[in-house]
Structures are given as C-alpha cells and as structure tokens.
C-alpha cells in the first residue's frame, strides 16, 4: 500500500511550522517532509516529531542565495566553500531531527564543467553522511519552472548516480517535474526503480492536489506499489484552497480530517 508523507512546507500552511506536524498526524499521515526548515530550531521540530510518532523523511540542503538567483550550489563554479557549508548545515540538522534523506540541489550553472563538479561534490556529500545512514537525493527539475537547471531528466540523473558510485546516492522522482520535462512517467519510474529513493507528487497544471489535472495519480500510486516501490510518496503540492478541503483524494488511503 502506498505510504504518503505530508510536505509541511507546502501543506497545512494554516498553522505555524512545527504545528503542521500535529496537523499532519491528525490527518493520518505517518511521516512528513519539508523543504528548508532551518529557521526552526531542530530540537523543537524533533520534539514535535517524537510527540506525534511521525518521522521526517526528507529535507533540502540550503540552496544558496535564492534572492540572487541560486537554485542550489552543487554544480556552480567558485562556490565550493558555500556548498560545503550548506551540506554541513543540512547534515547536522538531519542528524538532530532523525531525517534520513537530504535533497541536494544541483543549481543553474553557466559553464561547461558543471556536470563533473556535480559528480565530485555529490561523492563528497554522500561520504559526509554515510556513517549517519543518510541518503543524498538528486531531483531532475523541469526547465519551464527552473530555467537553466543542470539536472533535467531521469536518464541524466541515472548517469550521474552511476558516475558517483555511492550506494547512498538516490533519485528523487517527482511526477510533476518529470511529466512536464519528459512525459511517460510510469515508463521512467519503472526504468529508474533500482535507484529511486523517494517520490514526490502534485498535479499539473497548477501543482495542486494529485486528484486533478492531466496525470491519473491514483492509477500511478497503485502502479508504483505494484512495481515494488516501498518508499514514501511526498505530497509536495500547494492546496488549491485549504489543506483539509483538498484531502478528499487521500480518503481511500486512510488520509483526511478523521485519519
């Protein structure tokens, strides 16, 4: 049966950040994920996770200076020290809250040496957290929403994972990005299954609940399950109205206000 993690950076925004953990638990979620939790003290988030019994399955490493255009640091020329600092912050936070996955954003490079830098830095990052049993995640993103992003296809991600050669480097498979960028989501999922460490979902257009738009997510969830995927599906969507009003899609999976 599919297992769903609420993304508390995008869902339950009716509540303060740590209170979203309680809201997710009340709706039947057994886990959460988030984007950038660093304004919240890790001990505060860990206490709320422990109190509810939920786990934090994924967080993003700091992406650099977003206001200046950074969308990750792992492939950018001249930013090695910034990347190292970003990973150290993420690793400390992940260990403190018991999170087992860190998404490392590739960034939007402007030179031809970016892929090799990405490979080298991912190897360093994977080694940094290996003893803590943390996986490093890489996620292809669509170039419509993130122009110039280095990692833009599932096949490219597979090549990078092979080049890096670390068992704790995995693919973060996002149905929204991959449908826009390459389509044929189930074929890509089936081919990539051996290296997939986490899945995320949202509808398109709009990036809302997964019960609308051009993808049949209910069918995909069952297909992922049938293929043998046992990991989490992160609900990284923006509710079209309130979070609770939009949770009807999850009823068949035991999710909702009475979950």
Image (tube, helix red, strand yellow):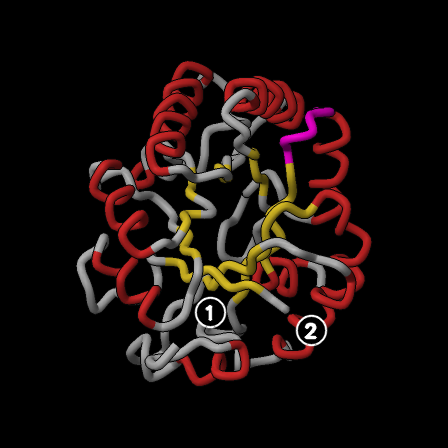
- Residue 196 rendering spot, x and y as whole percentages: 68, 47
Q: Residues within 10 Å of mark 1 (few under 14, many from 20)?
A: some
Count of numbered badges drawn on the protein: 2
Residue lying at 63% horizontally and 46% vertically, measured from the top left: 197
Vertical position of residue 67 compared to residue 89: above or below: below
Residue lying at 31% horizontally and 49% vertically, measured from the top left: 49
Q: In the image shown, does 68 or 62 lie closer to the viewer?
A: 62
**Left or right of 188, for residue 41:** left
Q: Give the number of the disc on residue 222.
A: 2
Q: Circle 1 — which element?
A: loop
- Earlier residue among tags 1 and 2: 1
Q: In the image shown, does 3 or 13 lie closer to the viewer?
A: 3
Which mark is in front, 1 or 2? 2
Residue lying at 65% horizontally and 24% vertically, measured from the top left: 119
Q: Give the number of the disc on residue 207.
A: 1
**Left or right of 76, for residue 70:** left
What is the chief secondary structure element of the magenta stretch? loop
Q: Is residue 155 visible?
A: yes
Image quarter hosting the N terminus: bottom right
- Residue 189 rendering spot, x and y as whole percentages: 74, 58
Magenta residues span 164-169
Q: Circle 2 — which element?
A: helix
Q: Is residue 212 visible?
A: no
**Left or right of 18, for residue 145:** right
């Amino acid at each position: 049966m599919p297992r769903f993690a609420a993304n508390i950076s995008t869902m339950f925004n009716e509540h303060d950040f740590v209170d979203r953990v309680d809201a997710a638990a009340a709706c039947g979620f057994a886990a959460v994920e988030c984007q950038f939790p660093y304004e919240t003290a890790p001990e505060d988030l860990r206490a709320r996770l422990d109190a509810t019994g939920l786990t934090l399955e994924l967080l993003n490493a700091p992406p650099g200076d977003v206001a200046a255009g950074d969308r990750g640091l792992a492939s950018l020329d001249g930013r090695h020290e910034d990347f190292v600092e970003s990973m150290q912050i993420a690793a400390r936070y992940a260990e403190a809250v018991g999170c087992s996955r860190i998404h490392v954003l590739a960034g939007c490079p402007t030179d031809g040496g970016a892929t090799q830098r990405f490979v080298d830095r991912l190897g360093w990052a994977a080694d940094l957290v290996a003893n803590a049993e943390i996986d490093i995640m890489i996620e292809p993103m669509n170039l419509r929403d993130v122009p110039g992003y280095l990692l833009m296809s599932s096949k490219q991600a597979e090549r990078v994972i092979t080049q890096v050669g670390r068992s704790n480097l995995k693919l973060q498979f996002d149905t929204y990005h991959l449908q826009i960028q390459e389509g044929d989501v189930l074929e890509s999922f089936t081919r990539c299954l051996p290296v997939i460490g986490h899945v995320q979902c949202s509808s398109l257009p709009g990036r809302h609940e997964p019960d609308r738009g051009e993808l049949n997510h209910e069918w995909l969830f069952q297909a992922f399950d049938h293929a043998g995927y046992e990991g989490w599906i992160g609900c990284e969507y923006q509710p079209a109205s309130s979070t609770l009003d939009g949770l009807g899609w999850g009823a068949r999976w035991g999710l909702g206000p009475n979950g």
